[in-house]
């Protein structure tokens, strides 16, 4: 299972990543919403751990844009 961790604070990403890896998940990391969307566009992501307050693109806007990638066409990636 692919997990995307999106947080502008590296320490938070590292803590979540360490736990997720210990449970056997494959991890992708992004430090802002724009980077997260780039990852989502090119990878099949099963779970997103998403911070709300981030620079460039906040968590709410990132979530709305993520919905564009949840169609059946996105499953073909």
Image (tube, helix red, strand yellow):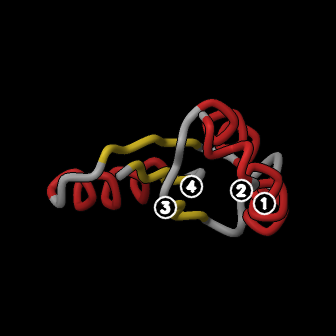
Residue at the disc numbered 3:
47
CA gap, disc 3 and disc 4: 14 Å
Mark toward the start of the polypeptide (2 vs 4): 4
Label 3 secondary element:
strand
CA gap, disc 1 and disc 3: 13 Å
Label annotation for residue 67: 1
Percent x, y for residue 63?
A: 75, 63
Residue at the disc numbered 2:
70
Residue at 18 percent across and 60 percent down: it is 23
Label annotation for residue 77: none
In this rendering, the label closer to the viewer, 3 or 4? 3
- Does residue 47 appear to the left or right of 27 in the view shown? right
Percent x, y for residue 22?
A: 15, 56
Query: Compared to 12, does 39 lie above or below?
Result: above
Q: Nearer the viewer, residue 21 or 12?
A: 21
Residue at 56 percent across and 53 percent down: it is 6
Label 2 secondary element:
loop
Mark toward the start of the polypeptide (3 vs 2): 3
Mark toward the start of the polypeptide (3 vs 4): 4
Residue at the disc numbered 4:
7
Give the quarter of the image for residue 19: bottom left
Label 4 secondary element:
loop
CA gap, disc 1 and disc 4: 19 Å
In this rendering, the label closer to the viewer, 1 or 4? 1
């Amino acid at each position: 299972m692919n997990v995307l961790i999106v947080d502008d604070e590296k320490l938070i990403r590292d803590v979540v990543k360490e736990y997720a890896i210990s449970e056997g998940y494959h991890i992708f990391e992004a430090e802002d919403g724009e980077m997260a969307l780039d990852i989502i566009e090119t990878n099949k992501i099963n779970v997103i751990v998403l911070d709300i307050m981030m620079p460039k693109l906040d968590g709410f806007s990132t979530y709305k844009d993520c919905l564009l990638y949840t169609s059946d066409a996105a499953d073909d990636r």
